[in-house]
Image (cartoon, coloured by chain):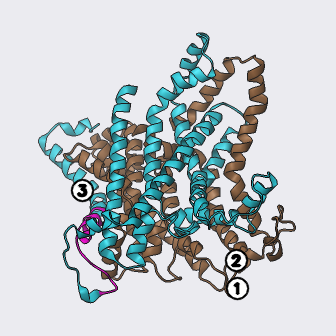
Chain colours: A cyan, B brown
Amino acid sequence: MALSVRRFTGGARAAEVRLAYLLVAPAAVCIALVAFYPLLSDLWLSLHSKNLRFPARGEPFVGLQNYLTLMQDGRFWNALRNTSVIAGASVGAELVLGMVAALIIHRAFRGRGMVRAALLVPWAMTTVVTARMWDWIFNANYGIFNALLLNLRLIHAYRAWTASADSAIWAVIGADVWKTMPFMALLLLAGLQMIPFELYEAARIDGAGGWLLFWRITLPLLRPSILVALLFRTLDAVRIFDLPFVLTGGGPGYATETLSIYAYRTLFTNLDFGYGATLSFGMFLVVMVVALFYVKVLGSGAARAV
Amino acid sequence: MAVTRLPSTVSALQRRAPHHGLRSRLWSSLVHPLVIALLLAFCLGPFVWLLETSLKTADDLYRIPPKLLSVPADFRNYLTIWQGRPFLQNVINSAVIASAATTISLLIGSLCAYALARLRFRGKNMILAMVLAVAMFPGIAIVSPLYLFFARLQLINSKLALIFPYVTFTLPLCVWLLTAFFRELPADLEEAALVDGATPLQAFRKVIVPLAAPGVFTAAILIFIFAWNEFLFARTFMNSAESYTVPPAISMFEGTGTFEIPWGQITAASAVVTLPLVALVLVFQRRIISGLTAGAIKG
């Protein structure tokens, strides 16, 4: 990709390298200073005991003590379970709904651009606004969700969806699916548009029906797009913070407390920066494991698709 | 860009492929429109209900079952949201911070992307890996060290405390998009400029930047929306009501005096900060979609 003009002399080559470093430097410095340095600092803090409430106790080194505490911390495992349930359920639902939406929009019809634009509305809406909006929709007394279900005779009496332990997590999942399904649909739609139409025509001439076309052509060829969409969405879902924090506050009790919320509370409510750093670094490790898993699958998937 | 051009070819081909069966006619005249309608209701319904709620009078708000249509519309909520709280200041804060972050991210990101797309140097892969890694960072993993860092520099409640993190966390998107965009531009143009005696930096500024304007614009929209919506850092690094950006302000929007949650005002404030985004999205939907999907497909 390099410009051939500058291949003529060694001096020009050195100048090219110098220029490259100069151009990359601001971004690299920014990333090093605002992302990597804090991450290392987080790891360092997690090996210490530090509570801003008791500055007199200082910041003694405690080794892996915080990590041992974490292993036996029921609230951590609860948060990990909630995070997994939310991520699993909402990404799963989004994949299915997003696929249906993408297939529907992929067909040519009047007003197609309008439908695609409508998909962007939930995506663009601030997550905090989304959370408050769904809080109102799920409202125990005046919420339209209750009124709708009652009219359809799906419930006998109004319920406090966000305030009862067994439904709150589903309220969070429902709101998350609403907000992020469109993104999934758009990624899958872009993938669908890359599949050559001739493949379908050829298969149809050979007598293949709709389902067969979907399983034998669409799904295999869409595999890379699906995996990329899953990677992005799973990483987002594992980090989920804004939506449950504003919609349920992690409650009732700890019923919807995610890893991010637990870490945040430990840090900025209890001011326990040592253990909070352990929780948040643990969270980083979880995210990296998820990312590596997908990248590995993605790598082999991409190889197979070629 | 290619993505947005494809549909016309697809529809042309589909028109050529005839469906005459009863099932397919039933499908295209009944089932398909029905599913489209359901999809639209699913995506827009909650937002429409938000708008409806913001136009209700205090009495209509608390009706069981809810009153579906807010007629006559009551715009009082849109006036009261500005009173007794620094909401206007919050909106201004968000606008200033998001604009600054967008500008700086584009500046830094486009230079980096140009080097990645056009120049040969050692460590290119490492830079790419670093940028990608940042895209996966959980914000919570760095929020406390950054807090201590900004506190030491006395930057808590300063706009800089949000601008720097926003620039950093939008760099992956910016670099990724622009690198892909620069790679598609023909290298001959710059080579011609270089032969004519321009320095590489001049070639970049005079030749590449104007040609890449659509890509830069797409990146700008996506970065702005990210910065406008961010909550975790905004809530942590700003701790006075006057310095809040929109998301923390909306999350803590309470009545000024009453104990009841002021849903009319909350929904009105939500509408005020969402409608500009919706307008942006409707006007630039093609660009946004191609920007969102470019990374996924080319990556």
Q: What element carries label 1?
A: loop
Separation of marks 3 and 2 at Cα, in angstroms: 53 Å
Q: Categorize mark 2 by other alpha carbons within 10 Å: few (<14), some (14-19), many (20+).
A: some
Task: State the CA–CA distance, disc 2 to disc 1.
Answer: 8 Å
Q: Helix or strand or loop: what does disc 3 sit on?
A: helix
Q: Which residue lies furthest to the bottom in this view?
A: A56
Q: Which residue is drawn at 64% across and 51% down?
A: B282
> Which residues lie in the magenta part?
A33-54
Residue flagged by tag 2: what amino acid is it?
A: Pro
Chain at tag 2: B
- Marks 3 and 1 sit apart, C-alpha to C-alpha, by 57 Å
In the displayed structure, A126 sits above or below A186; it is below
Image mark for residue A22 = 3
- Based on the picture, tell me whether residue A52 belongs to the magenta stretch: yes
Q: Which of marks 3 and 1 is in front?
A: 1
**Within 10 angstroms of label 1, few (less than 14), some, or many (20 or more) residues?**
few
Q: What residue type is labelled 1?
A: Thr
Relative placement, left or right, of B144 versus B14 is: left
Residue B246 in which image quadrant: bottom right
Predominant secondary structure, magenta span: helix
Q: Which residue is drawn at 40% across and 27% down?
A: A305
Task: Give yes or no for contact between labels 3 and 2 (Cβ–Cβ under 8 Å).
Answer: no
Image quadrant where residue A274 sits: bottom left
Which residue was labeled with disc 1?
Answer: B258
Residue receiving disc 2: B262
Query: Residue at the spot x=69%, y=52% of the render?
Result: B44
Residue B106 is at least partly visible in this image? no
The extreme left residue here reads A10
Give the percent coordinates (x, y) of residue A247: 58, 66
